[in-house]
Image: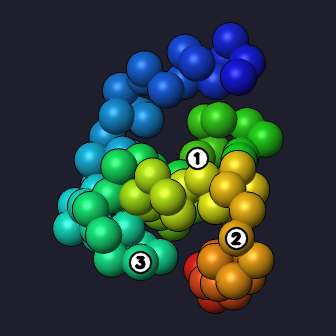
């Protein structure tokens, strides 16, 4: 994680966006419906000041790991890719 991104994650803008994304999804994972644990960028913005609510989704730990390719389950990974293509 870059220093700039680490600072951004503590900024008032990011905190407000996180709260709005969680409220929009009722803090439920937008992939599987379980309790949300993280706010995930669909695309990481090249310029952090251009970040926006439509680029954020609420995810549970399992789906967050799958979305980053940390966990390897062919069926689940394909499901995440399919859902991500619909979100985008």
Q: Are marks 3 and 1 in contact (CB under 8 Å)?
A: no
Mark 3 neighbour density, 10 Å: few (under 14) some (14–19) many (20 or more): some
Q: In which quarter of the image is the C terminus?
A: bottom right
Task: Identify which residue is drawn at 64% across, 61% down.
Answer: 66
The foreground one among 25 and 29 is: 29
Residue underneath mark 1? 51
What is the CA distance from the residue labelled 2 to the residue labelled 1? Answer: 30 Å
Q: Say what secondary structure mark 3 lies in.
A: loop
Tell which circle, 3 or 1, labels the residue nearer the N-terminal end. Answer: 3
Q: Quadrant of the N terminus?
A: top right
The foreground one among 63 and 87 is: 63
Q: Say what secondary structure mark 2 lies in.
A: loop
Residue 82 against residue 56 in the figure, above or below: below
- Using the rendered image of the protein, determine whether residue 55 is visible from the camera's viewpoint: yes
Q: Where is residue 30 in the image (x, y as percent from the top left)?
A: 42, 73
Residue underneath mark 2? 73
Task: Identify which residue is drawn at 65% across, 35% down.
Answer: 48
Tell which circle, 3 or 2, labels the residue nearer the N-terminal end. Answer: 3
Residue underneath mark 3? 32
Residue 30 against residue 46 in the figure, above or below: below
What is the CA distance from the residue labelled 3 to the residue labelled 2? Answer: 15 Å
Place residue 85 in its image quadrant.
Answer: bottom right
């Amino acid at each position: 994680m870059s220093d700039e991104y680490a600072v951004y994650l503590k900024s008032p803008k990011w905190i407000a966006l996180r709260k709005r994304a969680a409220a929009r999804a009722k803090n439920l994972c937008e992939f599987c419906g379980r309790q949300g644990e993280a706010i995930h960028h669909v695309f990481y913005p090249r310029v952090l000041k251009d970040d926006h609510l439509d680029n954020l989704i609420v995810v549970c730990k399992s789906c967050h790991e799958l979305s980053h390719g940390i966990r390897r389950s062919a069926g689940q990974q394909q499901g995440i890719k399919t859902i991500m293509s619909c979100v985008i």
